[in-house]
Amino acid sequence: MTSPVSHPESDFLQAVVFDLDDTLYPEREFTRSGFRAVSEAFADVLGNAPAACARMNALFDSPHRSRVFNELLRERGVTDPARLVPAMIECYRSHVPSIALYPDADHALTRLKERFSLGLVSDGPRSAQRGKIAALGLQDRLDAIILTGELGDGFGKPHPRAFEEIARRLGVEPHRCAYVADNPAKDFVAPNRLGWRSIRVRRSDGVYANAAAPPDGEPSVTIVTLDDLDPLLRRTT
């Protein structure tokens, strides 16, 4: 864990806001769950569902990551993949996912709820993110949730609007908020500019474990597990 930045007593925290994917749960779980749903829903085209699901997971780990469905349909001899891809994407995004919180995230939410207002700011398609939130039971554990996809086009991170809005909903001044997230390329630019504290959780299996931050996006502190979050905040608040 990097050394935390100390703050004056008058700047004590009142709210902790989290990112979702690879911060509170492993995003790869959603990917596997989504591919399984697609393989079952389109078995008449894709053939054996377990085999199709395994192939999609392999394609996801290849240079074809952004075109998994197109490539799979091509391999299956579908001459007009564009006809099916939108429906496959919708199935992937809107399926009921089989996912679970990281154990350290579950523990952190329980412990921090005793002392802070808790929120969430997340990018991503609305249907997918809402499905994840429901599957994880987060609506019952957080005081406010902002999905940038529900704010309109152009408001994804690093745009500050979601952070301004969640501070307003929580009734907390910006300098009394902290944001906990995993992707330094975009997650901390807006919080830093707004005077928030920014905390990176750098999970060894995270997609962005080796991502670099822009000059204005460096986190205040980096941790490797959310088990470090409660003791960190006790020392710096």
Image (cartoon, helix red, strand yellow):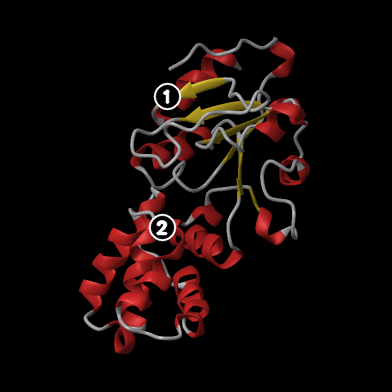
| Residue 115 relative to residue 46: left or right | right
Q: Quadrant of the C terminus?
A: top right
Q: Please provide percent x and percent y for residue 79.
A: 41, 86
| Residue 196 relative to residue 77: left or right | right
Of 4 and 8, the residue lying toward us: 4
Q: Which mark is residue 228?
A: 1
Of 138 and 194, the residue lying toward us: 194
Q: Quadrant of the N terminus?
A: top left
> Is 35 drawn above or below residue 188 in the view shown?
below
Q: Which mark is residue 170?
A: none
Of 25 and 115, the residue lying toward us: 25
Q: Residue beneath label 2, please?
A: 65
Q: Is residue 99 visible to the viewer in this orientation of the structure?
A: no
Q: How many marks?
A: 2
Looking at the rendered image, the disc whose residue lies closer to the viewer, 1 or 2, is: 2
Q: Are marks 1 and 2 in contact (CB under 8 Å)?
A: no
Tell me the amino acid under the disc marked 1. Asp
Q: CA distance from mark 1 to mark 2?
A: 33 Å
> Is 151 drawn above or below residue 101 in the view shown?
below
Is tag 1's residue or tag 2's residue first in the polypeptide sequence? 2
* Element under disc 2: helix
Q: Please provide percent x and percent y for residue 227.
A: 39, 28
For the point 76% across and 39% down, which residue is it?
A: 171
Tell me the amino acid under the disc marked 2. Arg
For the point 62% across and 28% down, which residue is it?
A: 214
